[in-house]
Image: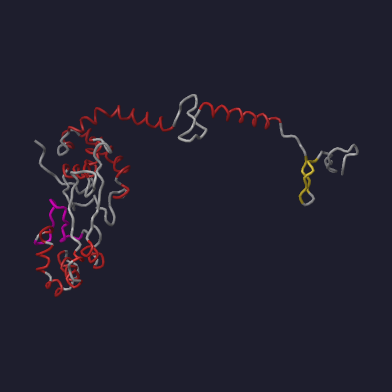
Amino acid sequence: MSDPNGKKPVDDVTGTETTGHEWDGIEELNNPLPRWWLWCFYLTIIWGVGYTIAYPAWPMINGATEGLLGFSTRGEVTRDINAFREASAARDAQLVDADLTTLASTNPDLHRYAVSSGAAVFRNNCSQCHGSGAAGGKGYPNLLDDDWLWGGSHEAIAFTVRHGIRNETDDDARYSQMPAYGEFMEETEIAGLVEYVRSLSGMEYDAAMAEAVSETFADNCAACHGDAGMGDREQGAPNLTDAIWLYGGDRETLTETITYSRFGVMPPWGPPRLSEAQVQAVATYVHQLGGGETEAPAN
């Protein structure tokens, strides 16, 4: 009903003024907000204005306002990282000069530091390809076994980490290239080589097809993989006699490999991307995963 004095409508039940809004016969009462709520609301406005003045807040063309306090989360993280580096500087210097082949026996504390530090480096930089557990995947080597394309000693692993494989940014990167035999071989020859390669690793194969291309293997493949197919680490040529396959040992995959070849690339992780201490640390971590090879101590 309307107020007799011509003011806003008044609710018949409560006697409270309404806002004039109505939905399906339900009128909105014009009750004042609780005073405590209003004060909280005003305080949040004051706090919000103060925050935008004190801290980075307003977006600009090339960044944001810095705020009177000059605070930034990135700056805080950078300070924490620098503090950690300063605390670890002495041990990192030791690690750079350490003989990794004898580190576990001569300096167990430094070896434990290298393994734990290397694990963090691995998770941040290597696990995206090799997996969080270092078991690898199709096209990415398993670092847990004892099959190494370029060698599994501390020195060999560190060199691979430092310079990478077949990349275009490091002149010392490990490099090898398998020809794409599909460019000059008949399909029957490639099919025979597939059977021959399967025979080397003890898999089921067609003996007649394998025998027919024995000379083809000797003329085209043995120069890298060896007469017996056991590979050559100097060239990064895989051992074809074991049951470990980087891309797969089934007929379809082997046919694709021989026809088109493979050309996996690993970026260089040496300085400035990783410090020399980090390279040493991650090499130590990878070496102790299970497949690392022993070598003579450095002179």
Q: Is residue 237 magenta?
A: yes
Residue farthest to the top, as pictured: 68
Q: In which quarter of the image is residue 15?
A: top right
Residue drawn where x is 45% and y is 35% of the image: 62
Snapshot quadrant of residue 50: top right
In-front residue for pair 72/25: 72
Q: Residue at horizontal 31%, vertical 47%? A: 127
Image spot of residue 146 (x, y percent): 19, 52
Q: Where the C terminus falls, by quadrant? A: top left
The residue furthest bottom is: 208
Q: In this view, does 172 lie above or below 52?
A: below
- The answer to which quarter of the image holds residue 96 is top left
Residue 187 within the magenta-colored segment of the rendering: no
Front residue of 153 and 197: 197
Range of magenta residues? 227-243
The picture places residue 25, in percent across and down from the top left corner, at 80, 50
